[in-house]
Amino acid sequence: MNVELYERIWMWAASALIVLFLGTIIVMSAVQAVSPQSHLETIDPSSIATNPEFGSPGVKPGPDGGVVVSVVAETFDFSPNPIEVPAGKPVTFRLTSADVIHGFEVVGTNANAMAIPGYVSQFTVTFPKAGEYLIACNEYCGLLHHNMTAKLIVRKEAP
Ligand code: CUA
């Protein structure tokens, strides 16, 4: 069978791209331990009020001198609000929702996750600079979705 050179180039190029993309996914998931944001950690949304962690959401000391922030999203508020965290230290957010799906986006940063009822979403970020950030719900959750915001205060650490 005679395949034109031009066509052969495209076939090889397309195959190379598929191998490259698949390889990237495999390497990233192995090396960077990429996992679904939910971590497959489940929680009963009806028992959040009595949950040892999310019953009293807030900022607690975490590993590496950082903090762990437990956040409950519920129409149309985040708890706690405001959230105060140190600058230059790892901040681990743990999010869940008491009712419907909400978003949790620290505007102007790459901190962005969904708060899904029944699941705990977790991610860790470091805010290099002190300042105030807007936290916005970016999943439509009801009539007052546009009002669902909170304030993140990043404090400069005392030396
Ligand atoms: Cu919560 Cu939109």
Image (cartoon, rainbow, N blue to C red):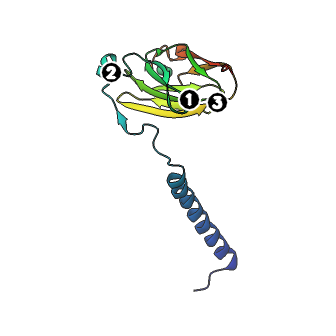
Nearer-N-terminus badge (3/1): 1
For the question of whether residue 139 can be seen, the reply is: no
Q: Which residue extends farthest front? A: 159
Give the label on residue 44, or none. none
Q: Where is residue 19 in the image (x, y as percent from the top left)?
A: 56, 65
- The CA span between labels 3 and 2 is 30 Å
Nearer-N-terminus badge (2/1): 2
Residue under circle 1? 65
Amino acid type at image mark 2? Asn
The quarter holding residue 135 reads: top right
Compared across the picture, whether 50 is left or right of 68 comes to left
Q: Where is residue 37 in the image (x, y as percent from the top left)?
A: 47, 38
Residue under circle 3? 109
Residue under circle 2? 51
- The CA span between labels 3 and 1 is 21 Å
Amino acid type at image mark 3? Thr
Q: Looking at the image, do the residues carrying marks 3 and 2 touch, with CB atoms under 8 Å apart?
A: no
Q: What element carries label 2?
A: loop
Quadrant into which the C terminus falls: top right
Front: mark 2 or 1: 1
Q: Looking at the image, do the residues carrying marks 3 and 1 touch, with CB atoms under 8 Å apart?
A: no
Amino acid type at image mark 1? Gly
